[in-house]
Amino acid sequence: MDEMWKGAALELRHLRCLVAIVDTGSFTDAGIELGISQAAVSRNLLALERILGVRLLHRTSRTITPTTAGVRALARARPLLAGAEELFIEASSGHHRLHIGHAWSAFGRHTTEFQRRWHQSHPETELRLIRHNSSTGGLAEGLCDLAVIRAPLDLKPWSHAVVGHENRYVALASDDPWARRRSIHMGEIPDRALAIDRRTGTTTLDLWPEDERPAVEYTHDIDDWLAAIATGRCIGITPQATAVQYRRDGITYRPLRGTEPVPVHFIWRRHDPHPATHAAVALAIDLYHDNRPTSGSLDT
């Protein structure tokens, strides 16, 4: 195989000429479509045939049709050219679009205002929020440029900044006796079964001494977590952002006393930051600073 390709210089322009000749039906029209001369079209086709070692087209004074080898070459060339075009568009427009990932919630009650201010201040950069059920909110998977992280995470591989803090809330079934109360104390939680999402949740058993930990029911994502709580068999602890963005029938949220708030981090790739990274971080910090968490109940 190496010997076959030695000295070969297959280029996209060769494939473009082959496709254009077949699609337009002539060398002249192919040249017009590609913006090159008819002679250049002929040279590119000849070069392609030499590289591949096969004849690709049957040519007469009136028709041009692909040979059997030409049909196979066209079948390969079209998706290659389409993929190259997609790569070019994605690479050239990458800095004109900012993807922010998150696992459960974006910016909670600040999400809409973040989107509005971003559009006003940075109309040249389209903002897209992406929910992905992973510990890095899709950043490690290459799905976003930055991610909002609340769950405990090793931050060493990433550049990061704390943009704000959110109070913790207890999620309860709406007919739970605790739902009639204004708030719940952290010390009461071990008396109940607790729903915990090990992959993306912010709650871990390390919040309690080893001999005072609650019983646990593990869940897989936000929907699974809410469904378990709605049955009344367990409760959940979550940042305020969840209480704001996931108001559901049958679920009530109450403030949790006696515990520290949850830090909200932005993380991004250390060696390949999006040009708009610092602008996004600054905006999030401004929003959290201007709207600091306050106690209160959130019902659904």
Image (spheres, rainbow, N blue to C red):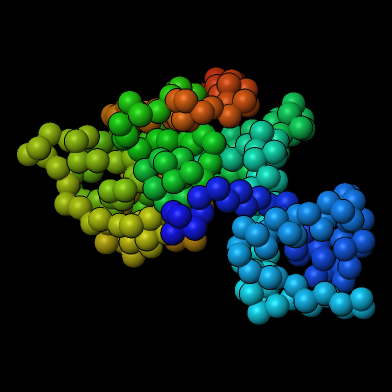
Q: Can residue 49 be seen in this view?
A: yes
Residue 81: where, in percent of width, then height? 68, 57
Q: Can you tell which quarter of the image residue 49 is in?
A: bottom right
The residue most toward the left is 211
Residue 182: where, in percent of width, then height? 40, 40
Give left or right: position of 293 versus 182: right
Q: Residue placed at 59% from the left, 40% from the top? A: 99
Q: Residue placed at 44% from the left, 46% from the top? A: 141
Q: Residue placed at 58% from the left, 51% from the top? A: 8
* Nearer the observer, 85 or 241: 85
Residue 45: where, in percent of width, then height? 75, 60
Q: Residue placed at 42% from the left, 41% from the top? A: 140
Q: Can residue 79 be seen in this view?
A: no
Give left or right: position of 294 versus 70: left
Q: Is residue 67 above or below residue 5?
A: below
Q: Can you tell which quarter of the image residue 121 is in?
A: top right
Give left or right: position of 60 versus 17: right
Quadrant of image for the N terminus: bottom left
Q: In this view, does 158 lie above or below 256?
A: above
* Nearer the observer, 250 or 29: 29
Q: Can you tell which quarter of the image residue 222 is in?
A: bottom left
Number of numbered labels in the structure image: 0
